[in-house]
Image (cartoon, grey):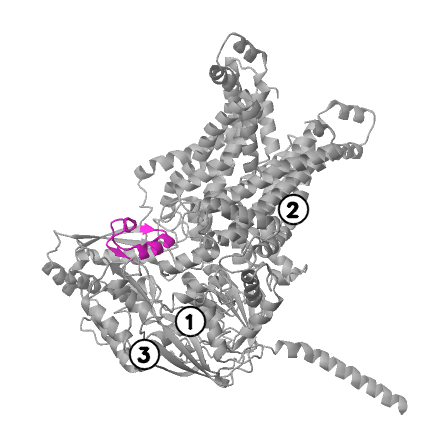
Amino acid sequence: MLAYIARRIVYVIPIVISVALVCFLLVHITPGDPLVAILPADASQELAAQLRAAYGFDRPLPVQFGLWLLRALHGDLGNSIATGRPVLAEVVRAVGNTVTLAIAAAIIGFTMGIMLGLIAGYFRETWIDKLATSFAIAGVSVPHYWLGMLLVIIFSVELNWLPAVGAGPGGSGAWAWDWAHLKYLVLPAITTSVIPMGIITRTVRALTGDILSQDFVEALRAKGLRETGVFRHVIKNAAPTALAVMGLQLGYMLGGSILIETVFSWPGSGFLLNSAIFQRDLPLLQGTILVLALFFVFLNLLVDIAQAAIDPRIKRG
Amino acid sequence: MSELPLSATSDAALQAAPATKARGYWATVGRRILRDKVSMACALVLLLIFVSAILAPWLGLEDPYKGSMIRRLRHIATPGYPLGTDELGRDMLARLIYGGRLSLVVGILPVILAFGIGTSLGLVAGYVGGKLNTAIMRTVDVFYAFPSVLLAIAISGALGAGILNSIVALTIVFVPQITRVAESVTTGVRNRDFVEAARASGAGPFTIMRVHILGNVLGAIFVYATSLISVSMILAAGLSFLGLGTKPPEPEWGLMLNTLRTAIYVNPWVAALPGAMIFAVSICFNLLSDGLRSAMDIRN
Amino acid sequence: MLIKTTTTRAALIALLALGTAAAWPRAASAETVLRIGMTAADIPRTLGQPDQGFEGNRFTGVTMYDALTGWDLSSADKASMVIPGLATEWKVDDADKTKWIFKLRPGVTFHDGSPFNADAVVWNVEKVLKQDAPQFDASQVGVTASRMPTLASAKKIDDMTVELTTKEPDSFLPINLTNLFMASPSKWQAFYDKAEGADAKAKSQGAWAAFAKDASGTGPWKMASFTPRERLELVKNANYWDKARVPKVDKMVLLPMPEANARTAALLSGQVDWVEAPAPDALPELKQRGFLLYANEQPHVWPWQFSRVEGSPWNDIRVRKAANLCVDREGLKDGLLAGLMVPATGTFEPGHPWRGNPTFQIKYDKPAAQKLMQEAGFGPNKRLAVKIQTSASGSGQMQPLPMNEYLQQALAECYFDVQLDVIEWNTLFTNWRRGAKDPSANGSNATNVTYAAMDPFFALVRFLQSSMAPPVSNNWGFINNPKFDELVKKARQTFDPAARDAALAELHAASVDDAAFFYVAHDVGPRAMSPKVKGVVQPKSWFIDFSPISMAP
């Protein structure tokens, strides 16, 4: 087991460096002036050249990459061009808000997904199954930014029950876990939860169906095991795969929240990414992408290791 | 939209891939899918959307670009404007139908391109193996390390807004996914008897790949690719929704959703229409892909 | 008896306690708060030189800071002109017109208590102009230096006197200086001393980052708390040097809300008391629900800027005048913009000191326009094709597509065939600097970039002076008119303020008479607020004074 973990970790190192390179290159193939955020269009060429030198954008790209990587290894992702604030602090704060949202969405999506999946798997080919499956397929097919808009239209515009945007009455800095704040979380969390809900429903349904159709279940039933016992058996067998899928879904929610956060002005990592893109703030852009990608890489690693721990057969693969 | 359940979709697709196929196999698949009511309904809806998008200029619609400040944001079922008008007074029905042209192209083309590129890469990596396999698959791993939404947005954000850039970004997102599937099915097939036999009879690697392997793996990769179309539609429209895809004043569903967002307090239901189109296309492709997969899974 | 007294006392104490308890929340809510939804996507920078254009200066510039000179924001009717700020008086050196003496206001302190003096002025000039100064901050240079293009250096004469030097004689300096806000050197130095960093540059960056979180200026508002990208709280500076401008509300909360409908919804639901630029479609509902709307002409112009390169159809003054006369601007205002524009008859409107007396009256006169076009050789059967580069959106662009379509239809009556080349806002803005001869102009012979017209350099000089042609500045169409050049020079070298204004008026009148632009509209800076907000005066400016505003209970 330890050897497996060590192997997986060593394998991650080149991935991490390549991911950093991709982040850097992505941002630097960008056409246009990297200083557009702070340089007015009517600035003189002399001023532009002076500032480019001050920020080091006049150096060759490999040198810039090397310096950036070296500093990044020390936990310094540079300063945002537009605001002058350290990128790492901005990203960490934003990721914190995204985690809040992802956890809320995970609670909703995973619970619903597991319940619907179990019910559908248990009552295969009945109307309950069809209903749950339709729900699931709608969940994975819906453009979630549109769903967010619909929810805003219904619950904020028409009914005026829940706030449409923002992260609480005092901003995310004054976040608290009470209703006055939580009501800001409801719509974005529901919107974020539909895809994991759909995917987990489908996964759990398939797993449950497979397990129930196996011969040994019949054997157990024949031996007089009660349905609760069969159920416990199903859960035990479905858990490893379901957990792995959930882990990955958590990763997608953390890294792919940009559209939902834009709809709800939720001040998380996706929102930050969006403003970095539109302000052409290169250090912030590459820093945010890097942190989110690394998050995802390590979550994948954790899922792999956890899966191997639960199911020893995987190690050999 | 994060990814579809890769494990669920691709595994099922892989299982569905029969090792050898009689001519009768595809006929059976065809018969089975024709009997599937849900799949047929979806195919019909998609056909309707495709045909009307293609025939849009001959349907006697209003000019989708021509606005008027006097008739802005009319409600659904206004006489003359069955689906109302948008924030610049342009006819929504016309824009939704014309919008299908760009939306479908930007949504589907990346999957087709990625299908071509990914299949070739995966086939070569899987058949040749060795160092080439390592080189291809490790590169793929790097792109796999990004959540697909993040990767698509990062690439489009870097390249700048534009239809072409969106297509490039989405293709880059899907190539690694298809390459992985293609590589794994190819690896599964390369040591089968009939491939060995072809090799023994002196066939070149290209011939083997093209004739003997491709025919046996294409089905599985194809089913997987169809399941990506829904994701691609949502992502493509999502890029436009963020302002990273199509530029105004082109009609495109994601962009329409974006610009109409300013109207949700005035005319919310008109503002929601373009999303309904994306949803319809996306769910139909998903159901059709499901139907195709179970039709190919003859064992059931 | 004793018992009774005790119980009475106990009851009294209990009552008192109840009373104070009841009084407590009332005392707390007696703090008056003004909450504002801005259009910016982020809080403008707080360290003294805001980003986000003039909206930045409006919220984190003139609130927390003062400059040597400022804008008079006290009247809704008069043009807003430059008045003394932290300098009480100034004059140019008679012998050397590149040297200016500024007398500083005595008795002013920064929010941290340190005194404002000549050292502070020199320090603030050097933060953007002296590259080897420890406080030099490249990130503040772009927005600042380009708004005071001729300032070169500063020197202390005595504690309350500073000498400023320009690169060339420039009478616009006092106007430019409204953009250089005075941050507290002592506060910054304290952060610098504490900052960690490998070298002086890193320490300086760290100090500025810390300063931005806990800033100190001399303005009527002090920074209280700051959540990046979400919220900035300012509290009133009870010790503000101008007693008349000590804020009436205790606290002002600024919230970035880039989306018009989100802002509007926040106002409707009581989340904020005031929003900038409410969604135009929501205006009827806002009015109907008793919210107040304010708007006033802004120093802003929505024009077509003509190409004057060889072969451009706009080289014929009759064609330029015809376009200016062919459009019903009132129809545009009411039909299309819900009244939210002021028809433009030049860069400055009557009543503005820089307006002058143009003889060419810009108004709606279709017959005159048609006649001019016929004289120029065009008519119903020989139409003139023109191509305009514009964007679908953009800061200050108002409603570019519908407005251009309106112009397209109007000009069609005067034998113009207008073709629109719609490109992305940032591209349009970049092309502006490249000029009409550049391939990026894509064959268009006019560009539609709106501009701010507060400062004579930005309002007139950069467009009209021949040496401002690309790549130097924004004379996009390569206007080369010796008369303009001469008048620019005259205005820049006239140092008596009244005479300088007269020279600028002469330059402006000449540009209108030459129909140098197709002048269409001025923006009006609409804002909506709850009826509880009292004392609002919206001047003809990009800025507004928050000090006289109070909140009714």
Say which chain tag 1 marks.
C
Circle 1 packing at 10 Å, graded few (<14), some (14-19), many (20+), is many
* Along the line of sight, the residue nearer the viewer: A125 or C240: C240
**How far across and how far down the image is residue B241, in percent?**
46, 48
Tell me the mark number nearer the camera, choosing from 3 and 2: 3
**How far across and how far down the image is residue C248, in percent?**
53, 80
Quarter of the figure with the C terminus of chain A: top right
Between marks 2 and 1, how big is the CA–CA gap?
49 Å
Tell me the amino acid under the disc marked 3. Answer: Asp
**How far across and how far down the image is residue C276, in percent?**
45, 67
Eyeballing the image, is A194 above or below C532? above
Q: Which residue is mark 1?
A: C179
Tell me the amino acid under the disc marked 1. Answer: Asn
Q: Quadrant of residue C302?
A: bottom left
Looking at the rendered structure, the secondary structure element under dot 1 is helix
Along the horizontal axis of the image, is B285 left or right of C370?
right
> Does the rendering let one see residue A120?
no
Q: Residue furthest right?
A: C2
For residue A254, which numbered disc appears in the image?
A: none
Between marks 3 and 2, how big is the CA–CA gap?
72 Å
Say which chain tag 3 marks.
C
Span of residues in magenta: C422-447
Q: Quadrant of residue C3?
A: bottom right
Eyeballing the image, is B126 above or below C81? above
Q: Which residue is mark 3?
A: C96
Q: Which badge, 1 or 3, comes first in the chain's sequence? A: 3
Q: Which residue is mark 2?
A: A106
Q: Residue furthest top?
A: B201
Taking the spot 56% from the left edge, 55% from the top edge, the residue there is A87
